[in-house]
Amino acid sequence: MDIAVFGDIHGNHSALQACIDYCMGKGITNYILLGDYISDCPGVRKTMDLIYVLRQYFTCYTVRGNREESMLNYRKSGENGWMKGSGSGALLYTYEQLTEKDFKLFEELPIYGIWNPKGSAGFEYCHGSPTNASELLFGNKRNTKRTLNKIKTNMLLHAHTHVQECFLYREKRAVNPGAMGLPRNKNCYAEFAIIHSGKTGWEEELVQVKYDRHEILKEFQSSGLVEYAPAWAAITMHTIRTGVDLSESILLQAMKLCEEDRGMVRWPAIPEQYWAEALKENYVDLSGKDIPRPKHNN
């Protein structure tokens, strides 16, 4: 039995379609969907439609990610706090693309699941951790070891860190399939995993698949996402183009510049001028391309 493990799609339907096609070619009919299906990339509706097709025609074990939780929380809060602009515009754009069907699904999904039939090796799955969709489980970190000590099976499938890896601790494994929609590898290939059942339990295979990046990049302009969140869209496009995620460093730099200039900063109300300056200081332009760095003469 083979099961494909998808995580952190982030609205990149082009990457999702390529990975589904790969799995179809392998005859895989079982899927684990680890959350963060939407936000950051513009393909919200196409991504959700593909997920509904998977869930209709194949066996899918599905959990909620922190991005789905943020959408639900925003709705419950009375839709207050998000605005157009690079601070929260991508979240607002995503929210406005969602339907009642999507919100119903997000509400129904758990943040943790376990597959543990009698007489067979089982596994557990979540987005962040079994108790917190936003927890980061990096390999060899103390909280990851603590989590592995507590699981009931010998394998935990998780996402959220955007790092494709397998971590072994005391005969238990934490497997992260990587970020399908915003991969961090030098080839910029979409990432996922396949787990294979054997006589001694489950074995993981980390997979990277080439996909049509130009398709999703074109949609940033045509979808209107760039108008909602100019700098954040540029950061996301840069990740798709290069496999390098500068989101945290650019966000912190924009906040620092704002605080130095105005004496205070409060997310998401960070004026675009500081985002633009932070992009420039990280050598990224508004189309998500690298700006040539100045040459220094020795």
Image: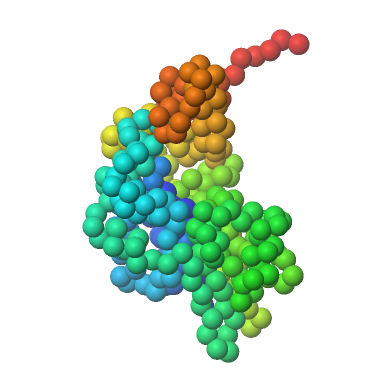
Q: Exactly how many numbered labels are in the figure?
A: 0
182 w.r.t. 48: above or below: above
* Position in image of residue 160 (x %, y %): 53, 53
- Can residue 278 be seen here? no
Q: In this view, does 34 lie to the left or right of 105?
A: right
278 w.r.t. 224: above or below: above
Q: In this view, does 71 lie to the left or right of 173?
A: left
Q: Which residue is drawn at 59% across and 41% down?
A: 186
| Nearer to us in this view, 109 or 41 | 109
Q: Which residue is drawn at 46% across and 67% down?
A: 32
Q: Which residue is drawn at 49% across and 24% down?
A: 264
* Position in image of residue 78 (x %, y %): 28, 47
191 w.r.t. 296: above or below: below
- Can residue 253 be seen here? yes
* Position in image of residue 77 (x %, y %): 32, 49
Please name the colour scheme applied to the rendered image.
rainbow
| Quarter of the rendering occupied by the C terminus | top right
Q: In this view, does 34 lie to the left or right of 140?
A: left
